[in-house]
Amino acid sequence: MKVIDILNKKFTILPNVDGYNYHQDLIDYTQVTKSLKWIIELGYRYKQPIDILRSMEYHSDEQKAFKLNFPAWFVGGIFPINKTEDKDILEYSNLLAIDIDKKDNSDIDIDEIKYKLFDLPYVVMVSKSISGKGIYVLILVENGHYTKEYYNYIEKLWNNTYHINIDKQCTNIGRKRFLSYDDELLIKDDNTDIKQWKLKLKEQIVVKESKPIINCSKYINNNDDTELTHKAIWYLLNNGYSIDDINCTEPYSVWYHIGCDFRHFEDGEQMFIKFSNNSSKYNDSLKNIQNKWKNTKIENNINEVGRKWCGICKRIYGNKWIFRLNNS
């Protein structure tokens, strides 16, 4: 993968950490979607106020309060309006940010270590944090759904290899990152191949089954548990389920009827967007997907929808599929 693909990746960005104040080049709105290139450039336009923040006492109340005025973005990817929990994500960026703070690494030369990390094939970019006292490292991973697992693995690896202590509070996908700039920004050039970090998921993400085995086959014939259906749908979507997984001659029609299934749920629009974006063959703007969502309507009752989606889980994951949901 070339860096040009990375620079064009889209992320949700808020005008400030709360999302409601007006800032330059950001509309007075809760959030917008912009490319990494745009976010980097915006950071340089904020250079003067960031320099003021960096001149303040490190981690002082004054600095913390001033920092709240700056735009914040989600390295995890694209989120719906006013929903920032990990489960709400619409589209993964497959990037994660590792924070290395000077206060946690007093014995390490941050400027020296950043070059060592930048040489790693899976590292995309290294930049100063907004405070200027630490750095964050962008890493390309294979599947953003497993951000926590990647983060925990890298934390141990880098601690053993470089004796680095990284911020353990940044493992969630929906974590906000303040806008920053770095005159010595390190980013891979256009001709550099970036290797995706791949976990052997079957070996490293083990579902522990300490409870008695329950045969869940009844859910393929009868299900009136709306909460279970909702959880089953999101489990499938977060694991990449899309129209590509359905053998059909008229994908548009099937895609529409699946949207009708999602109409039963408050977050059905987010389900529809996620299902659409999961497809490797589908390439449409968020606005167009939202417009198509408006044409869907409830067709089947919730029991029929439950039988369908819980049945898909059972078909893919076997009779123990509920354990996967409960341990995801």
Image (cartoon, rainbow, N blue to C red):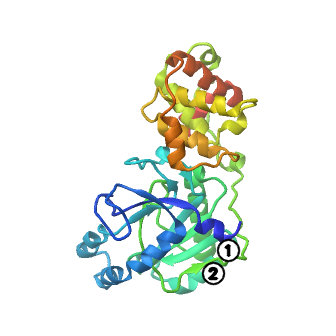
Point out the residue furthest to the left here.
Answer: 62
Marks 1 and 2 sit apart, C-alpha to C-alpha, by 7 Å
- Give the percent coordinates (x, y) of residue 2: 70, 69
* Three-letter code, disc 2: Lys
The numbered dot on residue 120 is: 1
- Give the percent coordinates (x, y) of residue 163: 56, 75
Q: Is residue 38 left or right of residue 54?
A: right
Tell me the quadrant of the picture where the N terminus can be found.
Answer: bottom right
Q: Nearer the viewer, residue 157 or 40?
A: 40
Image point 49% across, 74% down: which residue? 40
| SS class, disc 1 | loop
Tell me the quadrant of the picture where the C terminus can be found.
Answer: top right
The image quadrant that residue 154 belongs to is bottom right
The reply to whether the C-beta atoms of the residues labelled 1 and 2 are less than 8 Å apart is yes
The crowd level at tag 1 (other Cα within 10 Å; few <14, some 14-19, many 20+) is few
Q: Nearer the viewer, residue 24 or 205?
A: 24
* Three-letter code, disc 1: Leu
The numbered dot on residue 116 is: 2
Q: Is residue 134 above or below residue 291?
A: below
Q: Give the total of numbered labels.
A: 2
Image point 30% across, 67% down: which residue? 68
The numbered dot on residue 100 is: none
Is residue 133 visible in this depiction of the protein?
A: no
- Give the percent coordinates (x, y) of residue 248: 74, 29
- Give the percent coordinates (x, y) of residue 189: 66, 78
